Amino acid sequence: MRIYLRTFSLCIVIALLSLVFLFSKHDAKGFSAVLKQDRAPMEPSVPKNLNGVKSKQQAAGTTSHRPRDVAHKVSAAGQRETVELAAVACGERHEEAVNMLKSAAMLSSRALRFHIFAEEQLHASIKTTLDSWPAFIQAKFSYVVHPISFPHENHEEWSQLFKPCASQRLFLPMILKEVDSLLYMDTDVLFLQPVELIWDMLTRFNSTQLVAMAPEHEEPRIAWYSRFSRHPYYGKTGINSGVMLMNLTRMRMTQFRNDMTSVGLHWDELLMPLLQKYKLNITWGDQDLINIIFHYNPEMVLPFPCHWNYRPDHCIYGSNCIPAEEEGVFMLHGNRGVFHSDKQPAFKAVYDAFKHVSCIILVATSPITKLINRCFFLAVHIWRGSHELLLVTPGGGAERNHSHILWESQSFLYQRTWKVCEEDSENASSRWLSCSAAAE
């Protein structure tokens, strides 16, 4: 098992460092040109809580590195608008958050603006980390570090719902009033495809849709909500809020149907009554409240495929995310702590590779994601103890090998995993020096 973990981890690390540096130089120039016009002197931000008064945390706790505020309306796919991305990091979660942002910066070909909500004592650490990244990476993004902010009268109740600070996402429409659209990410998510691919789903929203999320599960017979939920939920299996694409303007303006009043309520009017009614029946905190809201307003949700929010549930009891098998994993969600344990070594290996890589490479194309996906699926099948292996080459159905290969022993399976990764990253070691030089 140790040989497997070492070889797979090494495979992923080599993949991260094996792209040609010419791509980096080319994209870095493009990003500098894009942000040159949009970047202005940094302005301090003094967030207020939801009652319109200054947050309990000091204004100095907010770190703002951002271009001037502009409206980010939904535009045609391919336009270089700024992608607004948010994460909430409390306690030890701030390291996960930084790793998630690193994966976004690596793979995006557009300008990014990060909104990081964190406890005051974490602000300096987050800022130091982001500011330490190479200049050609910093040219790709701006960021604002916000304090945690809940309604004053119910601060403790909201802040401790499910996990510390997790319910902050419910209040983003009211806090980020100048932001039109936003991609919210749990900290335990990694991008394996460019951010703009999911951002462009905003152009698919019809006149009633205002959020896009993936189903909580693909199979109702083994889904948590369909088996155990004690409250209403969206669709047949519920929705997972770990990756949540939102049109905040529509969310602020819309009146939501509910089971408490005969008239619709705005988002900020709905949250507290909903919590009071269902707090004894919910298990997953704010995600359960989101499910209840969209149970009564299903037309407002654009469901997206499971490979945009790929979790252990999709492979632990057998593979049940067909899009991931056919096209690869686009976003890897290591919920249940699998990024930090040996329960799912394939998840942990990908996370560790992003965490420990010393050189961040701009990626506008997808060779790295194809390699990571191939190694990931090989490892998942190995870990399930299966002698029946499905080889998947992401990038299109035509590239998929539908045949099942029966191997004589697990040890040969491990060797095959290394062999596939090694062949795809041939001569990668010779690029270490140029990669390190680029980082400096």
Image (tube, rainbow, N blue to C red):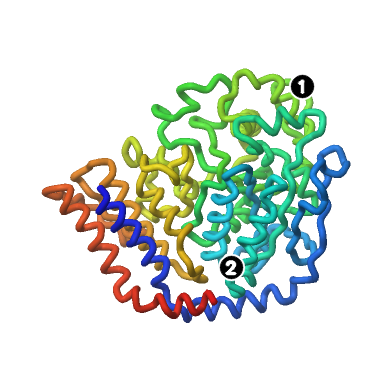
Q: Residue furthest left?
A: 408
| Mark 2 to mark 1 CA distance (whole Å) | 50 Å
Q: Is residue 170 left or right of residue 395?
A: right
Which residue was labeled with disc 1? 261
Identify residue type, mark 2: Trp
Give the x, y percent position of residue 117: 69, 48
Q: Secondary structure at mark 1?
A: loop
Residue toward you, 304 or 90: 90
Give the x, y percent position of residue 144: 72, 57
Identify residue type, mark 1: Thr
Q: Is residue 299 left or right of residue 56?
A: left
- Give me the residue at 70% from left, 21% from top: 259
**With respect to residue 420, does 21 lie above or below?**
below
Q: Secondary structure at mark 2?
A: loop
The reply to whether residue 79 is in sight is no
Which residue was labeled with disc 2? 133
Q: Residues within 10 Å of mark 2 (few under 14, many from 20)?
A: some
Give the x, y percent position of residue 367: 40, 68
Determine which quarter of the picture holds residue 34: bottom right
The reply to whether residue 235 is in sight is yes
**With respect to residue 271, does 147 lie above or below?**
below
- Give me the residue at 59% from left, 68% from top: 133
